[in-house]
Image (cartoon, coloured by chain):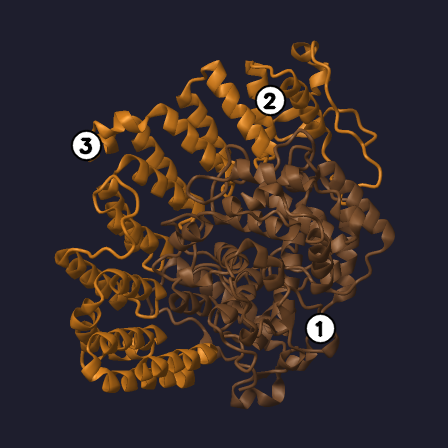
Chain colours: A orange, B brown
Amino acid sequence: MGESEKYNSDKGDYVSLKEQEEWRDVTPIPQEEEPNTVCPIAYTDEYSDMMSYLRAVMAKREVSQRALDLTGRVIEVNPGHYTVWMYRKQLVEELGTDSESELDWVAEISEIHHKNYQLWHYREALISRLLDQKTAEALTQDQLVRHPVIRRELLFATTAIDGDSKNFHAWSYRQWIVRTYGIWDQELVFVDAMINEDVRNNSAWNQRYFVLMGNGSRRPEKNLDSPLEDSLVDREIAYAIEKIKLAPNNESPWSYITGLLLRHAPARLYNTLLPKLQGLAAEGSGYATSITTTPMYWSTLVDIYERQAKDLPDQASVLLDMARDACDLLASDHDPMRGKYWEFRKSQLCADATD
Amino acid sequence: MANLFSYDFRYDDNEHETETSEAQKEVEDRIGRVYMRLVDPQTLPLGGEIDDTKHRLLRAKHEQLINDSIHGLSSVFTVLDSSQPWIPFWCLNSLDVMGSDIDDRLRRHTMDTLRRMHCPSGGFRSDPWQLPHLASSYAAVMALVVVGGEDAYSVVDRHAMYRWLMEMKQQDGSFAVHTGGEIDVRGIYCALVIASMLNIMTCELVSGCAEFIARCQTFEGGIGPYPGVEAHGGYTLCGLAALEILGITDVLDLGRLAKWMCVRQMPFEGGFNGRTNKLVDGCYSYWVGGAFPLLQKALRRTANDDYLYERPALQRYILACCQDTRLGGLRDKPGKHPDLYHTMYCLIGLSLSQHYVGVDPAQEIADKSSVFSVPARMMQWGAVPARAKIIGARINILRPVHPVYGISFGPLAQGIKYFYSLPPLAESFV
């Protein structure tokens, strides 16, 4: 490091804080150079410099614009610095910084650092302060969706999802907003749009389940095994079938509808879903080949027959035979990579039969 | 068909192209080229069989990368400034699993480094100016156990750690990862690994954990970070391992979990993905692959039944696709840069695939859910040599690791022996 502290960074020449008039009054606290450290990081001069001054202001518990600006610059370079995010949160609160401009700043950070954890958590905290639940409870879903704060957050999450359709944090953040402010209806519309964009987007399918469980209520997750209204079940079965037809060899709609029905309307597995699937698998349906060559079809049959056998014990023997045949077919032809699993699955069916 | 490789297993997009299917096909193209180089040409007329005898774990190259990293890291690692306790863990655990030498000097320096990262009021953080973090604390404690010896163990103030864990504890049974930090299943895993190792488990600490994890199991069968969020490999291991520590894995729907885990293995690539319709990644060799021994125990299967996934196919993926032959170290997939995180998780994933690690169900310990049964239950785990499956050269064999802790049995046993020779906390008896 024979160079002077000035060098070219993306934003122009870096000038050490030591050279800046504004920081004359502060004695920086450099990181102690410990000998024999394992895995020491060779920080850039810029980072070392910024951190030295940041430590100093944190030690003084300084609440100031310059401290705030400094946290911003550190986060830009190292967005994973969760302690600095916390310090920034404190500063924003104590300085009474305009939330709008703070949200803009977070948006800028997210453009550089898409996969960062902390910015979402930070944003949650900002929004909670901007729009508390008590105020929200007085508004209808329609009003909430059009509320500038919420509209902005939904757009923020949507933008992130546009860039990365399965961004884990973005989808999770949407769950937080929807759950906190009870805006379930618009989420179903969003989910629909995302599934139309890519029928294989499993995050969207997971969100669909999430919305259904919220079901218009403002309380969080309903009882895991609570029943669903018949009309809703009809709608979801039809929806899943429609999406299965687009690309049968797609895990998402199969695991969605099976998971949904197993938990909330098991009889509909064999009363409604099964006949529809058999219809698709029949010769002349136009889907016979694509449906019967995807492992998911056979796998779903196993689940359906197993459940049906449990509910209708006098037919159990025949149904379990069919389920076992499907397991064999999967192990040998359609899903040999999961041969050991299908063997296991089959043995479980036998166990049920002898109970 | 030797060890299940076939172009028949390539993804069928039903001629309906979406972003997901295009991305998948691109990865398969890449990996297909790697595998085709390994195909025994004489078998091509019959479809093509991979000669799995040729795979070689490039220990020396990985050791080189790790030793260079121990010596120093470039400024690009600034983004890991707040995760520093992880780095010696990735390095030392990788060396240990490979059976490489960890000399006294390295032990001392690691201890000294981690001592500086220890927060007197509990937990570990990169430096005294950062808040202690649960994930960093987990990594630091595990690294100290890998180092081994009383000097290393006594770096941790158990009482302070307990108090800090209880500060992170939430009403609903979960843990925040730092003061004001996010709450998810990772927190529970880290807290319980630390507490079970350090002999600071109490009823208060574990209360509500199992219920929270159960709520995180989704309709798909896997476990997500928080109730309602998508099932994900990392959180699935965290949840299952935490429940194994608690001795109550049956709060989960194990049938659905088994299905979800098995479907994570990619038929063409052989490795695991982390979520439905996402891409294969070497680190899931541990997060999903490493969960299979835990599942095995939960299902009360024995060593006579194999794990429920294709072990050779995973090992082939790791050895053929995840090793960086030029730079050393292991990676997510071909085309990605190797890094220390992927190095460790690919290696312990490989170990857990090579070895059959389990617990004899006939030796079930009564009163499993008592906090006092934890050390005995954790030490019941061991490798069954007759059930090992090593792909490639025999010398590829790694040290067996414990699926809950991800570290090898020798250091683990020494650590547990030490910490449980200390008196339990007064809080255990409340």
Viewer-proximal residue, B430 or A20?
B430
Asked if residue B335 lies left or right of residue B61, the reply is left
What residue lies at 67% left-to-right and 38% top-to-bottom? B78
Viewer-proximal residue, B32 or A263?
A263
Pointer 2 and pointer 1 on the same chain: no
Question: At label 1, which amino acid type do we have?
Answer: Ile
Q: Which numbered tag is attached to residue B397?
A: 1
User: Which mark is in front, 3 or 2?
Assistant: 3
Question: At label 3, which amino acid type do we have?
Answer: Thr
| Mark-to-mark CA distance, 1 and 3 | 62 Å
Is A148 located above or below residue A94 in the figure? below
Q: Which numbered tag is attached to residue A140?
A: 3
Given the image, what chain letter belongs to the residue carrying mark 2? A
Asked if residue A265 lies left or right of residue B230, the reply is left
What residue lies at 64% left-to-right and 32% top-to-bottom? B130
| Mark-to-mark CA distance, 3 and 2 | 41 Å
Question: At label 2, which amino acid type do we have?
Answer: Leu
Q: In the rendered structure, which disc, 3 or 2, sits on the residue that comes first in sequence? A: 2
| Mark-to-mark CA distance, 2 and 1 | 50 Å
What residue lies at 35% left-to-right and 34% top-to-bottom? A153
Question: What kind of element bears circle 1?
Answer: loop
Tell me where residue B81 appears, x and y as whole percent.
Answer: 66, 38
> Quick check: marks 3 and 2 in contact, CB under 8 Å?
no
